[in-house]
Image (cartoon, grey):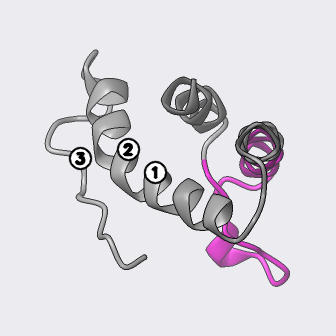
Amino acid sequence: MTTSIPSPGQAMSDVDSQITCEAAIELPVRELVDAIIQAGWQPMVVYAAMKVVAERQGNAYTEDPDPRRSRAGPSTIPSFAGSLLIGVLL
């Protein structure tokens, strides 16, 4: 899984930025899901787990919007990304 994710092509305030982001992450997310399923996990378990993880990471980002500046900082994603990921997975 070495798919690169492109930077946004428009301002983040653009109404289509979520759609553009969904398109940008669709292939990497699909590759990740496929790899997890190929490792033996049931698809519905994978989707449920990814929803929880995305929500958790969104909450962590809300608490620390710049994890690069924190000492502990695991990589996180913005809170709206949980809904993005859920939309992609459903």
Amino acid type at circle 1 is: Arg
Amino acid type at circle 3 is: Pro
| Camera-side mark, 3 or 1 | 1
Q: What stretch is highlighted in magenta?
A: 53-77
Residues 47 and 25: in front is 47
Amino acid type at circle 2 is: Glu
**Residue lying at 57% horizontally and 67% vertically, measured from the top left:** 35
Percent across and percent down for residue 69 are 67, 76
Left or right of residue 65: residue 59: right
| CB contact under 8 Å: marks 2 and 1 | yes
Question: Pointer 2: what residue?
Answer: 26
Left or right of residue 4: residue 63: right
Per the image, is 76 magenta? Answer: yes
Element on which disc 1 rests: helix
Q: Badge 3, how many Cα within 10 Å: few under 14, some, many 20+?
A: few
Per the image, is 89 magenta? Answer: no
Quarter placement of the N terminus: bottom left
Left or right of residue 6: residue 37: right
| CB contact under 8 Å: marks 3 and 1 | no
Question: Pointer 3: what residue?
Answer: 8
